[in-house]
Image: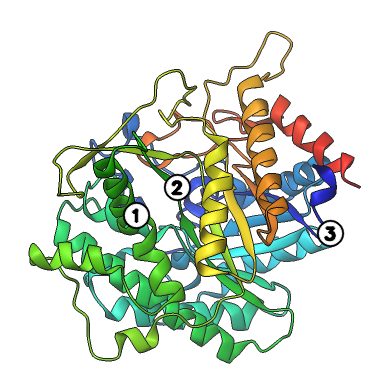
Amino acid sequence: MKSLFSRNFLWGVATAAYQVEGAVREGNRGLSIWDTFSHTPGRTYMGHTGDVACNHYHLYLHDIALMSQIGVNAYRFSIAWPRIIPDGSGPTNPAGVDWYSRLVDALLEVGITPVATLYHWDLPQTLEERGGWRNRETADYFADYAARVVDLLGDRVYLWITLNEPQVVAEAGHLSGIHAPGIRDRQAAITASHVLNLAHAKAVTAMRAINRNNNFKVGITLNLSKVYPADPTNPDDVLSAEFVDARSNGWYLEPVFNKRYPEQVLERYASNFLLPRLDTGDFDILSPPIDFLGINNYTRIVVRAVKPGEPWKCETVRPTGSTYTEMGWEVAPDGLRDILLQVHEKYHPREIMVTENGAAFDDRIDNDGKVNDDKRVEYLRSYIASAAEAIKAGVPLTGYFVWSFLDNFEWQHGYSKRFGIVYVDYRTQRRIIKKSGYWYQKWIASLK
């Protein structure tokens, strides 16, 4: 299995700005929608906020030393839009740029490749008050922000991700309302999804106009899960799985690669008068070439038809006999291999990276001061083996990033869910490398 991974393969860890940085009032940072959302009573577990989080803003040098100790050669982090442009549009904030510049320099000094995500859910609150992702102007503001950041950091950062999981932004933020900005409106979610797809496309074009370095690469990260029918011999289950795949995966893959949306989903939305505003020229804007596709994968989706002949009427199935994480997600490593193969065979990205993969478990510090997270060790081992199978089958996989480097603020769950391979005592900010972190260290070392 080890021989399948190239010498240049990126073995990394990942975080997101609002989940780890803290220091929300420092360095002239503006407010984000997650500042507003988390400070609204009843929105997060026990009222937890990202005000302090892991204090990565002040402890980044210590954290980079831990990354070096583990042996990773890449760090995927996100840049907080409100740190760079506090109001979303207007002047650039030098203090915000300086912090990310120092972070990048510190990574490069120890041989860790910086992989920068431009949007990991922290929209400037000022833009939300103008309509947020329901407002088509936000796509233009994002493209301007992306170009500015690349102009400022692109001499040292060569790997860029425009958006992280636009589906979650649209649906968790605008349909279920469990994420910021907390809207519950199907039309708002569909509109936001289209504006996000436009934002990605416009940003890629603007970034390429700024940076023409041959090493410069830009992509997008989508959360993709393989969809299986509960009964593969039942035609209705099969049709439901195909519809869910088109709605959940295809709605974001098709505009990235093929300048269109899945017809069956468009028809379904049109029948309910829920189409996004599609202006003349929108499809010409979509699908500028990308250099890699980032895939975040944690589990699989299994669906059962509820009403024959109407594949959109279906339910998700919780398979019996499986292991589940603290998030209630099934541990299904074959799903990673299968979604990688599906995307490779249908869309042929130049490169694919697994930009997030990991699991939340009920981690505790033992009496000897160690964190023996054996379930996470087995999870990572099995998913990396699944990734190797995909490479063997021809998938151009060039990187794998564990989610997450640190235990952190897990959005609406606050600090109740731990994903890290490094344990964080939120009261003292003490870090403890977990057994999974040491396993990852040994795995990486074994490949040299």
Horizontal and vertical percent for residue 165?
A: 43, 57
User: Which numbered disc covers residue 225?
Assistant: 2
Image quadrant in which you'd find residue 319: top left
Task: Tell me the quadrant of the picture where the N terminus can be found.
Answer: top right
Tell me the residue that label 1 is attached to. Answer: 248
Q: Visible in this render: residue 57?
A: yes
Q: Is residue 108 left or right of residue 428?
A: right
How much space separates mark 1 and mark 2, taking CA atoms? 8 Å
Residue sitting at 82 percent across and 57 percent down?
6
> How packed is label 1: few (under 14 Cα within 10 Å), some, or many (20 or more)?
some
Query: Which residue in the rendered view is the most extreme toward the right?
Result: 448
Q: Are marks 1 and 2 in contact (CB under 8 Å)?
A: yes
Decide which of 164, 105 is in the foreground and name it: 164
Decide which of 440, 379 is in the foreground and name it: 379
User: Which numbered disc covers residue 238?
Assistant: none
Q: Is residue 140 above or below residue 133?
A: below
Upstream in sequence: badge 1 or badge 3: 3
Q: Is residue 237 above or below residue 434?
A: below
Horizontal and vertical percent for residue 179?
A: 31, 48
Q: What kind of element bears circle 3?
A: loop
Q: Are marks 2 and 3 in contact (CB under 8 Å)?
A: no
Q: What kind of element bears circle 2?
A: loop
Tell me the residue that label 3 is attached to. Answer: 111
Q: Visible in this render: residue 132?
A: no
Amino acid, disc 1: Ser
